[in-house]
Image (cartoon, rainbow, N blue to C red):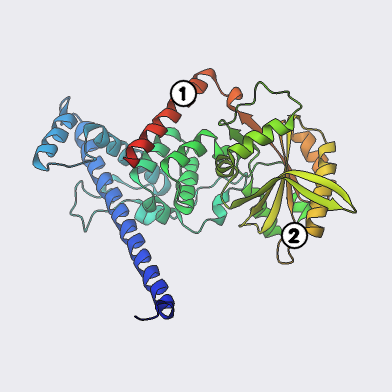
Amino acid sequence: MPNVEIYADAVQKIKAAILQSRYLAASVANAEQLKLYYAIGQYVSENSRTGKWGAGAIEAISGQLQQELPGLRGFGATSMKYMRIFFEEWTNEFEKARHLSSDDLGSPLLPIENRHLPSDEIANKTTEPSNRQLPTADLKVDNKEAFLKIGFTHHREILAKCKNPDERWYYIRRCASEFWSVETLKSHIRADDYSHTGALPNNFKLAMPDKKLAARAVRAFKDEYLLDYINIEDADDDDERVLETAIVAKIKKFIMTFGDGFCFIGNQYRLIVDGEESFIDLLFFNRDLQCLVAVELKRGKFKPSYLGQLSFYLSALDEYVKKPDENPSIGIVLCKEAKKTIVELAVRDYNRPMGVAVYRTKADMPTDYQKLIPLMDGVRSLLQEIKQE
């Protein structure tokens, strides 16, 4: 029997080729599907919006399609109306971006080899607002690639929840670059990542000599985190350990909330300096920034004195824990309430990179939304059970 170990390299190379081929095939199939939906959306829009078709036409067409192609999925009346929205919303945006005439968009239901999305020509246009830094600067996909890379269900969710074109492109690029599921996308939209990412009050540019690294650090954090899976309303407002315990119990969700690239090292991380112990509430490592991230939890309002303690922790981490090839550690105070002006004044006098963010829990959400959370969790559990059967 041959020694399988000598073929290990060959196995890995063939495996990589297979996986790459599968990925490319899936990408091409997804792009073609989007182009098909766009063309159908155009055809439905041009006939239904102008009165060429009567009431109930889409339902009738969908029903007839099911008879002509038994087992056809994804072409119900509701889905076809979503295709119409997909065409109309993006055509309007593309026309504003390039001032296209209707002739530039092509005829409805062209043969598949001639069918195209306007994004093929114009989606490389960057539409990020200039007043703040967004994480899209670090993404490895351009707008065209990102647009064609994510599924139609992702597009539906983004079109339904985001009306600002810049916001739509932000979530499209994040989905494409970080491989978000639809549920993950929903949670990030619900937390309003677009408004909060890159807005953290901090001293990164002053405390970090590498300006590119400082800019990446700004984009890695938000000024507000939605922890709607945590319920600590019955606890004492001064008891940070209750908040810490709740976060550790849901650490996977917390990491997803915190952002891409974070790895959890531990809670109450023990530091010993000259025989005296100190404990960091939460310690992470960020793969993109290549540095340790210390998080101090505070149940109440931000106080400038919190930064002194955090600065000491960062000094100790850099002295005794950080590896030579890693970047200086970053500290985040996560508290219930903070005034941006006070934070900005407080952090600028420290030479260790630090920032202050606030959090919201389930108790902070509107009553109607709180009622929906158990229902959504129950639906997810039911779907998981069905999947396992």
Going 21% across and 41% down the picture, which residue do you hit?
A: 73
- Asked if the residue at tag 1 contacts the one at tag 2, i.e. Cβ–Cβ closer than 8 Å, the answer is no
| 254 on left or right of 40 | right
Give 192 or 334, whichever is nearer the viewer.
334
Give 339 or 4, whichever is nearer the viewer.
4
Q: Position of residue 202 (x, y in %)?
A: 73, 44
Name the residue beneath numbered marker 1: 372
Quarter that holds the N terminus: bottom left
Q: CA distance from mark 2 to mark 1?
A: 43 Å
Q: Quadrant of residue 227?
A: top right
Question: In the rendered image, is residue 348 in sight?
Answer: no
Element type at marker 2?
loop
Up the image or down, 357 lies above or below 97; here it is above
Q: Position of residue 20 (x, y in %)?
A: 37, 65
Give 110 or 359, whichever is nearer the viewer.
359
Toward the left, the furthest residue is 68
Element type at marker 1?
helix
Up the image or down, 340 lies above or below 144; here it is above
Q: Quadrant of residue 365?
A: top right
Q: Position of residue 157 (x, y in %)?
A: 40, 37
The disc, 2 or 1, on the residue closer to the chain's N-terminal end is: 2
Q: Amino acid at mark 2?
A: Lys
Q: Amino acid at mark 1?
A: Leu
Up the image or down, 291 lies above or below 69; here it is below
The label on residue 322 is: 2
Going 21% across and 35% down the picture, which residue do you hit?
A: 76
Quarter that holds the C terminus: top left
Q: Quadrant of residue 376?
A: top left
